[in-house]
Amino acid sequence: MDIRPRSPVVVTLRLCLYALFAGLLVLAAARAHDPAAVAAALGTGAVFAWGALSPATHRSQRVAAVWLAALCAAWLVLLSFSPEAVWAAFPLYFLQLHLLPVRWSLPAVTATAGAAVAGFIGHGERLSAGAFLGPLLGAGVAVATVLGYEALYRESERRRELIEELVATRAELADAERTAGTLAERERLAREIHDTLAQGLSSIQLLLRAAQHALPDGSPAAAHIEQARATAQDNLAEARRFVHALTPPGLERGSLAGALERLCSGPAAPPEVRFTVSGVPAGLPTPYEVALLRIAQSALGNTLRHARAQRAEITLSFMDTAVALDVVDDGAGFDPGAEHTAARSGRAADGGFGLPAMRSRAEALGGTFTVESSPGQGTAVAVTLPYPDSGGGA
């Protein structure tokens, strides 16, 4: 067992144990009529005091074991001179259980209890049930107390570790939620800039070019129109740079397939996530790539948080007229009908807007979104987006 103090409570208990042992030695010396018994009690007290006060016995288990062996030997000598030494066996049990590993402490306690009974009988004292059972019951109480404390301590340590892990997980989850919110806002801003500001500037440019062609040669307004068109062109380029800067980071470093592969390699704990590509990869418009990546992230996030799955697989399929994304897991599953009913009331059954948001993304691009699941049978999410030109690739 660990000989280092674990808490103020343990230190206090050890001091009380030392005080009990010292008090019983004093009692044995006071009631002894033989000078040899008094000398043995004093010698036992000296050995005990050296170990109790020496820092080495608290730092080294080897030194503690040597001290305990010397103390037991001194106690046996005292027991041979005085039957009063039997009572010192009780604190000695606790010292043995505290300083020795379990495989050594239990035999030591048993031997000490046997020596106490034998010493009591050897002094010619009248044998009774109390004299025989007392040391044995004391040994049993000591073993149960110490082993019970050790079990409670281990359970407390496990709970402390679980609490620390829970706190760390909550912090990671909060960071992930903040990151997801930031990325969602970046995507929304990029879409708004693209759909409003960039499109408006592009239309202004076309109108100014048409007005420029309609002006007669030498018109004084031509220079102003050209300046306005150049300004619109510069602002359109700036808006496009904003849109590019606000696109998801996963798509900035490569293709959609690469972003999905990096997504699958992220989780370090179950489930094991695999990624496969079917068909010949084709270039997709940025809104398609963003939508498919976001749907995959949301579906995989649901798997990690709720499904308790062991395996999951993401498949990106390039077909003749459409691109498809499938996210499948072998987790707990759920009832899609109940989820749909909850979604119609404004919230999903898991407390969020995951499935309705995924469906909205797919349908906004003219695609389809389906969920197949049942309790205990896993979940399959399928998204199909037709190519913009419906001609077999964008």
Image (cartoon, helix red, strand yellow):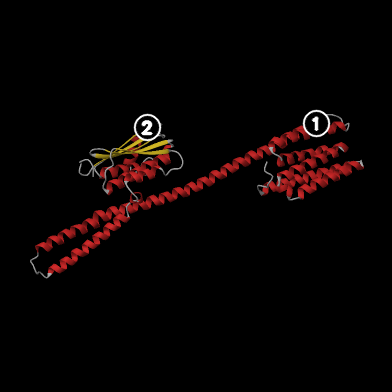
Residue 210 higher or lower than 337, as above or below: below
Q: Foreground residue, 55 or 356?
A: 55
Cα separation between marks 2 and 1: 67 Å
Q: What crowding class fits label 1: few (fewer than 14 Cα within 10 Å), some (14-19), or many (20 or more)?
A: few
Is the C terminus in the top left, top right, bottom left or bottom right quadrant? top left
Q: Secondary structure at mark 2?
A: loop
Query: What percent of the width, then of the height, locates residue 256?
Result: 32, 45
Which residue is at a point 39% across and 38% down the rendered structure image?
274
Say left or right for 157 vs 239. right
Q: What crowding class fits label 2: few (fewer than 14 Cα within 10 Å), some (14-19), or many (20 or more)?
A: some
| Residue bearing the label numbered 1 | 130
Q: Foreground residue, 78 or 341?
A: 78
Is the N terminus in the top left, top right, bottom left or bottom right quadrant? top right
Residue at the left extreme, as displayed: 216
Which residue is at a point 47% across and 47% down the rendered structure image?
170
Q: Secondary structure at mark 1?
A: helix
| Residue bearing the label numbered 2 | 374
Disc with the residue nearer the chain's start (2 vs 1): 1
Say left or right for 275 vs 216. right
Residue at the bottom extreme, as displayed: 220
Amino acid at pointer 2: Ser
The image quadrant that residue 112 belongs to is: top right
Say left or right for 74 vs 347. right
The image quadrant that residue 122 belongs to is: top right
